[in-house]
Amino acid sequence: MNQVSQANKLIELSREVFIRKSERIYKQEVFRLKNQPKFRSLTKRETEILTLIASDLNSSEIAEKLFISKHTVEQHRKNIYKKLKIRSIPQLFQYALAFDLV
């Protein structure tokens, strides 16, 4: 394979990667704009806990880090899920990504 064809192949591959990343960023921005009112309904503490959950901490670890009880963390978690109308960690992580919490 000569240098010109290698360069063309590299350009095409780069273009495909750029398109995929652009599409992902666009979808994330659409999600962010659509869900901004729900996200803004979270308290500062709920946003902090959402960030820690998305950072892969469990309720006990969050409680220890924030000097609150595990029960309090669980209640905040329930409130977050209710306010954002979500039911899973992947959905929660989607918010964390869209709102630059991780």
Image (cartoon, grey):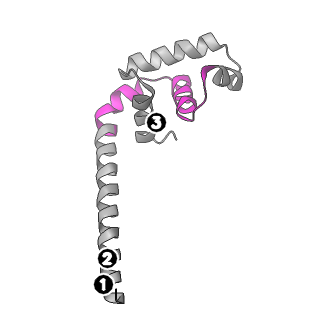
| Mark 2 vs 1: CB contact within 8 A | yes
Give the quarter of the image for residue 1: bottom left
Of 26 and 43, which appears nearest the observer? 26
Q: Is residue 39 magenta?
A: yes
Foreground: 11 or 49? 11
Q: Is residue 87 above or below residue 12?
A: above
The residue that mark 1 highlights is 5
| 78 lies left or right of 55 | left
x and y percentages locating residue 43 in the rendered image: 50, 23
* Disc 3 residue type (three-letter): Ala
Amino acid type of the residue tagged 1 in the rendering: Ser
N-terminal label among 3 and 1: 1
> Which type of secondary structure does the marked residue at label 2 adopt?
helix
Image position, residue 68 (x, y; %): 68, 16
Mark 3, other Cα within 10 Å: few <14 / some 14–19 / many ≥20: many
Residue 86 is left or right of residue 89, and the answer is: left
Residue at 35% across, 69% down: 14
Place of residue 15 in the rendered image (x, y in percent of width and height, measured from the top left):
30, 68
Measured along the vertical axis of the image, is residue 19 above or below residue 1?
above
Q: Residue furthest front?
A: 1
- According to the picture, the residue beneath numbered tag 2 turns out to be 9
Look at the image and give the residue range highlighted in magenta. Answer: 32-59
- Give the residue type that dot 2 points to: Lys
Q: Which mark is residue 96?
A: 3
Q: Nearer the viewer, residue 1 or 23?
A: 1
